[in-house]
Image: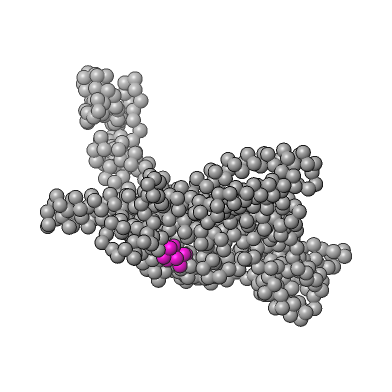
Amino acid sequence: MITKMKKLTFLVYYKEYEEFLSQIRELGVVHIVERQCGEMDDTLQNFMQKRTLYKNTLASMYNLAEKTVDANVHAGVSADEVVSTYEGLQNKIQDLNQRVPQLDKEIAQMEVWGDFDWKVVSSLKDQGWDIQFFMCSEKDFDEEWIEQYNAIKVQERGGHLYFVTVNHGPVDLEMEPLRLPSQSLSELNAAKESLLQELAQANAELKNFCKTHYHTLEEGQLQLQGEIDLWKVKLNSQRMAEGTVVLLEGWIPVDNEEEVKKFLDASGVYYEIRNANKEDNAPIKLKNNAFTRMYEVLTKMYGMPDYAEFDPTPILAPFFSLFFAFCMGDAGYGLVLIALGFVLKKKMSKSLSGMMNLVITLGVFTTVIGAVLGTFFGVSLFDLDLPDSLKQFMIVGKIGETTYDKQMLLALIIGVVHICIAMTVKAVCSTVRYGFKESLSAWGWLLLVVGFVLTGGLSFFEVISENVSTWAFIIIGSISAIGIYLLNNIHRNVFVNIGAGVWDTYNMATGLMGDVLSYIRLYALGLAGGMLGGVFNQLAFMVNDAAGPALGWLFCGLILVFGHVLNIAMSCLSAFVHPLRLTFVEYFKNSGYDGKGEAYRPFTTIKKQID
């Protein structure tokens, strides 16, 4: 459900404004109304840019530290110093990395000439001998150069000939002499080894720095976020009476009203407080029980409800669990999820342990639904020698003499119920927001769909006679038509309403049919997961029979473990994505849910929590 909100309006003397903000921030329950429009001022823009820099640096540091960081915060080191040092180390490593290819290139140049001493070449030059280095193709080399220019062949490689000339002065061979590195091959190799050692040391230094100072920068980021929040509040304050009085507006949950009133009365600040209206853009704070609260993360993925809407989480929670379990469709996989949830819950931080409660809950649903669907690690429970009292609860096999599966029919029934609930929510929510007269079309469609479904179901199971069902269809259709075609908008001409009703009928006829058929994916995914598990079982025991008693059980176990782990992973992915789609598309569309509300974010002091 959505927590009721109260609107607060403050008038603060400008000299007491800073102290008042500090007290409000310490109170930590007031959501400040944002009025700032257009471009951000320079200060806030700089803050936002710096926050992005801190965020990106933290992500890089966490990866470089191999996700293992110290919990210490160095009080004497600022966040800017951490970023500056980090960037300096990164630049150093980048410079060293750029020097490695250059050294490799010079080493490759010198390898063909061997390891000679440049000092000898220099001493010969001092004595009047000019030594030049050349390269040409083998066919272009003239043997007369050996006598004419004292050419000495050094090496032939890849169709090229490398040679030197030793003369009193430069020679003219119609080719440019090579420019070789100023160091010998051994010196270049030594330089590269030293460079690689320096690079390894720099990487180790960076890794250690990231481990040591990660939480220092994280603390700085939290402080910066606090500065951003404070500056936003100041920007959203309105100065009045020539700047002597500051007007500030905010929201508080009704649960905190007495606490806030007590504080404001003691502070002497003038304030007004009133209930939030449907038209107000009040922030949203969800308040649900322990079971429903686990699923609030799914609601937030789509968007928070508007203040005048209903919180979809109480309906989302049981249906998403049911959809997930139906898609998994295996009681054994449910037990694996339960065990995995308990194991990870002990190892994870408090902030993530709540997600493991959701995993455990989904595992419980999967175990129960999987048992009802009659599958345990790919084995059909219905085919085992189990008591008939247990088998009677299993939904397996065909419907009577038809070729349709009972599980497929169950998936469609679940879809019809889900969509009917969505249409009910839409009609009720529309009535609450706009009034009953403005919601006659929604009630008409609800009566038509739900009435026809119930009448058809009662007639199918022979609870009512065919004659009664016929009259029920006529009466329900007639009453529904009034709201759908004549009163869908009481402010318009009746002929316009009829045209709009016809268009809505076309959309409903095509849309509802497609929406209901979408729920077949529950049956299809559960069937696919169960069949794949059965295939791995058959493959494992075939290998066991073929490999003999010694290696058979080993290979059998490996195939079973690998196969079912892979199947569980794929089934979990499908069981999360497709129920989410059924909720976000089919349910939210038919319930009229917009999800454009603003989350409740109180102006408070950000405290560091190291898990």
Direction from residue 481 to residue 170 in the image, left or right: left
Q: Magenta stretch containing residue 283, yes or no?
A: no
What's the magenta bit mostly, secondary-structure-wise?
helix
Q: For the N terminus, which image quadrant?
A: bottom right
Front position in the image: 475 or 55 = 475
Q: Is residue 13 above or below residue 480?
A: below
Q: Is residue 207 visible?
A: no
Q: Magenta stretch containing residue 363, yes or no?
A: yes
Residue closest to the far right: 241
Q: Quadrant of residue 332?
A: bottom left
Residue 285 in percent (x, y) is at 63, 65
What residue is drawn where x is 77% and y is 66%?
248
Q: Quadrant of residue 176?
A: top left
What residue is drawn where x is 65% and y is 72%?
28
Q: How many marks?
A: 0
Front position in the image: 188 or 580 = 580
Residue 233 in percent (x, y) is at 71, 63
Q: Is residue 20 visible?
A: yes
Residue 497 in percent (x, y) is at 74, 42
Direction from residue 539 to residue 309 in the image, left or right: right
What residue is drawn where x is 41% and y is 60%?
369
Part of the protein shown in magenta: 355-366
Q: Is residue 512 above or below residue 275?
A: above
Q: Is residue 160 above or below residue 114?
A: above
Q: Is residue 118 above or below residue 137?
A: below
Residue 61 in percent (x, y) is at 46, 59
